[in-house]
Image: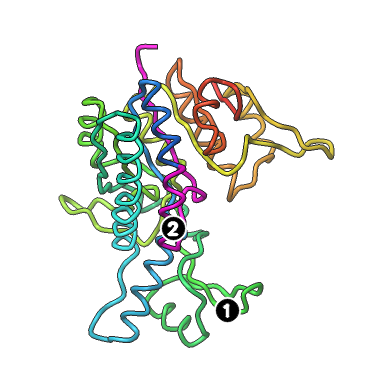
Amino acid sequence: MDNKKIVVALGRNAFSDVFPEQQKRVKKAAKAIADLVEAKYDVVITHSNGPQVGMIQTAMTEFSRLDPNHTVAPMSICGAMSQGYIGYDLQNAIRTELLGRGIYKPVSTVITQVRVDPFDKAFNEPSKLIGRLMTKEEADKEKEKGNYVEYQESDEGYRRIIAAPKPVDIYEIDAVKTLSDAHQVVIAAGGGGIPVLEQSTELKGASAVIEKDYTAAKLADMLDASTLMILTSSENLTIEKDGKTEDIKDISAKDADELISHGYFDPITTLPKIDASVSFVEAKEGRTAIIANLENAKAALDGKCGTRIS
């Protein structure tokens, strides 16, 4: 295979919202990435930031509450902070793992902005919970700012809910491509990227988060990677059919599309992974998408486990 460029999307099981625990977990992720580097792949990594961006948003909100001179940090800034924080832990863990194997290869984190469409229907149908539980008084104040808040019966409190639009373009793609073409390991578009709206020459942060699997597929497509790998806590995709659980091992993009149309995948957890994989594979011949367990990345790449879409 001439094109050995792979985009790897790390799920939330590779990280933690507790500092010491995250440093333990990223070591496992680093081993998976190092295995791919040893297999002579040029690796570009993107990652989840769900718990971390929520932790940052909560901390910044509390800070503004304790000191009214400081305003609440917008979601775009919280996303940028999470990219830097996670990238810092991840790039150091990968560097250490590579050096331990006798491999010197620069590892860089690129703070990445992703354009979203202001008319994306997701802005009218916010779906992602963010931040801590709020009292009714706090919720009312959020509503006054124009934010969407909903009462959560299970938590007996109010939570802010934000939009999850699809990615349209990645502004730092040329920088990512240059580093990747130089055979460096690159961490980019963390948390799906910082969602921004283009206003003339200015990029304005959007009050949203982007599903990282869709951004991973967009990133892989724009880099013309041969492989998209989405690493999770599951061994492979499964569906419930005729009262039985079926493992999905090898499947064509066409057959996967049919399963999607029949509603076999959970819209919150599984659908983005398979939908993004299909869009990547269908965009150009010869591409492969793999969904597998983090600890079995190399075995999945070799076709020994996981779900493979082609």
Could you tell me residue 85's position as x and y percent?
32, 56
Could you tell me residue 252's position as x and y percent?
60, 21
Could you tell me residue 49's position as x and y percent?
42, 54
* Disc on the earlier residue, 1 or 2: 2
Magenta highlight on residue 24: yes
Report the residue marked by disc 1.
Answer: 157
Residue 215 is left or right of residue 250, and the answer is: left
Q: Which mark is residue 148?
A: none
Magenta region, residue range: 1-28
Mark whose residue sits in front, 1 or 2: 1
Could you tell me residue 272's position as x and y percent?
53, 42
Q: Secondary structure at mark 1?
A: strand
Q: Residue at x 60, y 22 (%)?
A: 304
Residue 298 is left or right of residue 167, and the answer is: right
Quarter of the C terminus within the rendering: top right
Tell me where residue 227 sits by quadrant: top left
Q: Secondary structure at mark 2?
A: helix
Q: Residue at x 35, y 45 (%)?
A: 93
Q: Residue at x 42, y 50 (%)?
A: 210
Is 3 rendered above or below residue 246?
Answer: above
Quarter of the N terminus within the rendering: top left
> Disc 1 versus disc 2: distance between alpha carbons?
23 Å
Q: Nearer the viewer, residue 263 or 97?
A: 97
Tell me where residue 167 sits by quadrant: top left
- Callout 1: few (<14), some (14-19), or many (20+) C-alpha neighbours within 10 Å? some
- Asked if disc 1 and disc 2 are in contact, CB closer than 8 Å, the reply is no
Q: Which mark is residue 123?
A: 2
- Callout 2: few (<14), some (14-19), or many (20+) C-alpha neighbours within 10 Å? some
Magenta highlight on residue 256: no
- Which residue type does callout 2 highlight? Phe
